[in-house]
Amino acid sequence: MGATYSSQELYDGLVGSGLIIPVGVPGIFGRNAVFEDVLRRFDDHVSRVAKDDGAEKMLFPPTLDRKVFEKSEFLDSFPQLAGTIFSFSGKEKEHAELSSRVHAGESWGHLQTMTDLVLTPAACYPVYPSFTGTVPEAGRLVDMQNWVFRNEPSTEPTRMQAFRVREFVRVGPPDVVVAWRNMWLERGVTIMRSLGLPAKSEVANDPFFGRGGRMLAATQREQQLKFEVTIPVISEEKPTAVCSFNWHQDHFGKIFDIKTADGKLANTACLGFGMERVCMALFKHHGFDPKTWPAAVREKLWP
């Protein structure tokens, strides 16, 4: 009998096995040591695949300079997903009101003000300002693992509000960037299939906001600017994207004044593995106890 798919059954299995720990907010949960071990071992597996690529390793916090965020034009396309950080900046009178309202279960948001930080909405965003200027003739390649926030509360376990992405960002001339994107698209499918997962690649689009967003999504698909590697995790009809590939053309080159060695605007592309989603795909297809997984899969992750 083939696999059956159910969002609730996957969630119940992950919780019942102790792999994820509910905290009371949809899309937010803890992870236990087994979940984290699988995540780290998949991360190490990706590192082994990419070890000869010559990427620069960087690490950023889960927060982003609000000015960089505003400059990125994220709010033009995805206002519904953004998370802005607010904090208290009042005096004693306002603090007394704040405390009183909190204890009374009343609204207290108006007593906070916007800070200079937002929660990072895409794993690649922190790196673009560092590219400003002229990149080397061969371009640059950066490797990161960053926390990402998306305001998408959901009871569906693969749709999280806070999650980690193993991200690679390529910057350079268009032909170099597109060739790199295409190479990694093949790699992404190969990596997943080598772990016993029924992966396939498909053209995709981002969740642009509003009526204008539908036109942007159609253009994105027509120009094949976005691909995803998908695996059935909660649904066979609507498989889950575990890896995403985006060619931004010269969008970030214009915004952050990034030039190639010949003085032209640089192109950028990024690819990201959704780390928790990959783990959930492994648990779904191989069981909630990694010790029982197929030997071929364990050899890849526990070499």
Image: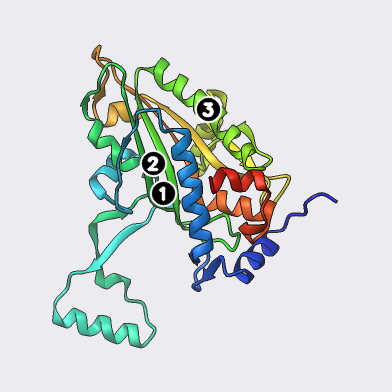
- Measuring from the top left, give residue 149's x and y in whole percent: 41, 54
Q: Reading the chain from its start, which is encountered first: label 2 or label 3?
A: 2
Q: Are marks 3 and 1 in contact (CB under 8 Å)?
A: no
Q: Is residue 63 above or below residue 107?
A: above
- Measuring from the top left, give residue 278's x and y in whole percent: 56, 48
Q: Are marks 2 and 1 in contact (CB under 8 Å)?
A: yes
Q: Reading the chain from its start, which is encountered first: label 3 or label 1?
A: 1
What amino acid type should be assigned to the residue bearing mark 1?
Answer: Pro
Residue 264 vs residue 243: left or right?
Answer: left
Q: Residue at x 65, y 38 (%)?
A: 199
- Disc 2 versus disc 3: distance between alpha carbons? 16 Å
Q: Can you name the residue that lies furthest to the top here?
A: 262
Residue picked out by circle 1: 79
Q: Which mark is drawn over residue 76?
A: 2
Residue 226 visible in the shown view: yes
- Disc 3 versus disc 1: distance between alpha carbons? 19 Å
For residue 256, what is the image quadrant? top left
